Amino acid sequence: MAELHVELVAADRQVWAGEASLVVARTTEGDIGIMPSHQPVLVVLQSGPVTIRTTGESGEGTVVAAVHGGFLSYTDGKLSLLAEVAELADEIDVERAQRSLEQAKAETDAEAERRASVRLQAVAAER
């Protein structure tokens, strides 16, 4: 089976790297799915969950991350997600994200509300 080599990198660290059969991400043009042999592409990422269907020695699985801005680049079987901020769903503190969402709504801070909402969406998508 053909595979993608995927790297999800945030400004401060490498969040995840490995082999995958499919990556779905939100872009400014809408959601995009990348599979092996996809046409080369460079797009701007929108805040949203990124879903990675993993393959490899450990078997098939799914990795979900909350991504806030950045770029997605695919060429020659290599997919790079370069995010301003990215968190794996299993790293997200759900109670803290819920408190952040409530506080952002109370303060009518649309940007903070979107970030907290994306974190909760990523956690929900992983389950």
Image (cartoon, rainbow, N blue to C red):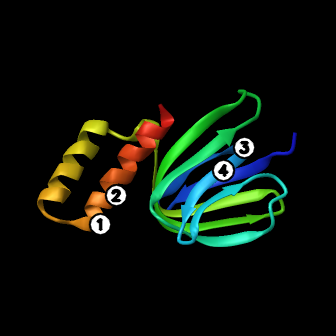
For residue 23, the mark is 4
* Amino acid, disc 4: Val
Q: Measured along the vertical axis of the image, is residue 126 above or below residue 110? A: above
* Residue annotated with mark 3: 20
Callouts 2 and 3 close, C-beta under 8 Å: no
Q: Is residue 85 left or right of residue 106?
A: right
Q: Residues within 10 Å of mark 1 (few under 14, many from 20)?
A: few
Task: Please name the residue that numbered disc 2 is placed on.
Answer: 115
Circle 3 SS class:
strand
Rendered location of residue 121, percent (x, y): 41, 46
Whether the residues at callouts 4 and 3 have beta carbons within 8 Å, the answer is yes
For the residues bearing labels 1 and 2, Cβ distance under 8 angstroms: yes
Percent coordinates x, y for residue 32 in the rendering: 64, 60
Residue 23 point in image, percent of width and height: 66, 50
Residue depicted at 25% across the width and 37% down the height: 95
Along the line of sight, which residue is nearer the eye, 122 or 8?
A: 122
